[in-house]
Amino acid sequence: MSRSLIQQFLSHVLRPVLVRLLRWTERKGPLPSPRTSVFLHREIHVPTPVVGVAVWVLLSAVLFMELGPGIGPLTAVLILTTGLVVLFRLYLHHDHPELMHDDDAIALIGVLVVSAALGMDLWFHQINLSPFGFPLAAASILVTVLLHARMGVVLTLVLSLLFGILNGFSLDNALVACFSGMAGVSLSLRVRTRRDLTVACLGSAGGGAAAVLMLALLKQWPPAHVVGTLKWVLAAGGFSVVAVVALLPLLELCFSRLSTIRLLELSDVNHPLLKAMSLDAPGTYHHSLIAASLAQAAAERVGANALLCRVGAYFHDIGKLAKPEYFVENQGAIGNPHELLPPNMSRIVIQSHVKDGLALAQKHNLDRAIADFILMHHGTSRVEYFYRRAIEQTDVTQEVDEDLYRYPGPKPHSKETAIVMLADSVEASARTLENPSPQRLVDHVDRIVDSKIADGQFESVPLTLAEVAAVKDAFVNSLIGIYHTRLHYPTSQETNLEKRPARPT
């Protein structure tokens, strides 16, 4: 009776409320990012409080269906779910404050928690299969790959608690789920291919099997029970492989996440945009490759996402494909078309490569995190060369509007976007150095980095002074390797002249 009442409540009360919330939070109009939700071909923006309330209600409903009717069980369920939501929010506030404002990440966590809870209820009470066969570790692995390993550990603990409660408050089941999830999280830390995902999922089965053997020894389970339980635990590993491989691309698409696997796919130089750049804007392509090398080296020094920096640097200048001849690295012998334009027109052309790059990112369905590098690699910096030209060509009695010669922004908001901004500026300007000796490179990097800081470009970036110094050092080491000197290789004619004996005088 209670189960039917809950089902009626979900279908007739909760569902209409959630639909209205979804319609209320739907934003129409131009899409601000190239990769958005696939629902209704519009961006669906669900605020974090709405996600929290939805998770709280759905978890309470699932647990109440398990624990039975009555005021006592209902009160206990509400205390438990309220405590879980509040404690999880406190954890996010202290350990992952950046996620507090990332509605996509919170929605992803909410969807996985609710899906796991509903899946467990269905698996245990509708399908009536062994609880040890449920692929609970898949949720932990997905969170680890898409968000963070510590988040995967916390989610494993929460889901293991729910797993035990939904199995009649079974500590045995909770321990097996916890061991399985922790093993999956530990093996997902360095996932780079789908093979690594498979290994992580099967490894989670190994963790669950270890827990089963521990319990069998402690409780002296019969051999037949141990073998049957192990079969289901191993089957859960196989089910986890299917679930993770199938859901990972979908979750990346719907929640604007970038896994290492997706980044490695984007780093392929055969990507259509990179191939077009190598043919139509070869100077920009070469600049992007070197900037990517600088950014990756710097990111590794400060503990940032080096692969994301590399891929972001590959694509940061794709907007130059629209008018490649207007950028000095692509001009070669064709001449400089800016000589025929006033500074105001030139700065419009130069600034437009950010907008053109975002349009190309949308057309080729690049991820939001990659589009951020396109938008932020200049921040609100000045188009310095044409600003100076405008001052020189303007009458003394008139002033040049500096804001017109600044990029529209936004400024970098992460270590990765800040590092790529610096790598872009350092690499491009280093080409103007005459006789780039190590000391000149050090002075040059100091000047570029300090000017960006003084201009306020890193106001929202969590970089410390020590990390800035490490970034400078990484840039200098990489540039010294690029602009190293070589010994003079004599030609064959010079060698023959040296070997020729001197004529007697």
Image: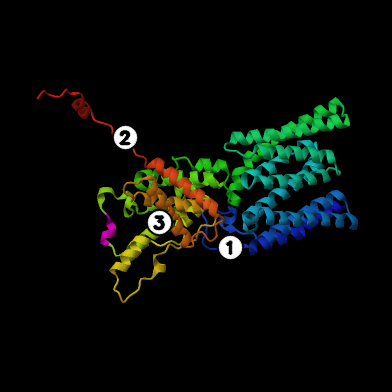
Residue lying at the far left in this picture: please name it.
Answer: 505
Q: Residue 378 sits in which quadrant? A: bottom left
Tell me where the magenta segment starts and ends, as one range. 336-340
Give the residue number, with chain letter if any, for mark 3: 353
181 vs 65: above or below: above
Q: Is residue 319 visible?
A: yes
* Residue 96 percent location from the top left of the image: 65, 53
Say whether residue 150 is magenta: no
| Amino acid type of the residue that numbered disc 3 sits on in the rendered structure | His
Say whether residue 337 is magenta: yes
- Total count of labels: 3
Q: Residue 55 sits in which quadrant? A: bottom right
Q: Earlier in the sequence, mark 3 or mark 1?
A: 1
Residue plotted at (28% across, 34% down) = 488
Mark 2 lies on a secondary structure that is loop
The mark lying in front, picked from 3 and 1, is 3
Residue plotted at (18% across, 27% down) = 497
Q: Earlier in the sequence, mark 3 or mark 2?
A: 3
Give the residue number, with chain letter if any, for mark 1: 27
> With 76 as the anchor, is 448 left or right in this view?
left
The mark lying in front, picked from 2 and 1, is 2
**How crowded is the residue under tag 3: few (<14 C-alpha within 10 Å), some, or many (20+)?**
many
> With 418 as the anchor, is 181 left or right in this view?
right
Closest to the observer: 433 or 277?
A: 433
| Amino acid type of the residue that numbered disc 2 sits on in the rendered structure | Leu
Closest to the observer: 303 or 404?
A: 303
The Cα atoms of the two marked residues, 3 and 2, are separated by: 40 Å
The Cα atoms of the two marked residues, 2 and 1, are separated by: 62 Å
Quadrant of the image containing the C terminus: top left
Give the residue number, with chain letter if any, for mark 2: 487
The Cα atoms of the two marked residues, 3 and 1, are separated by: 27 Å
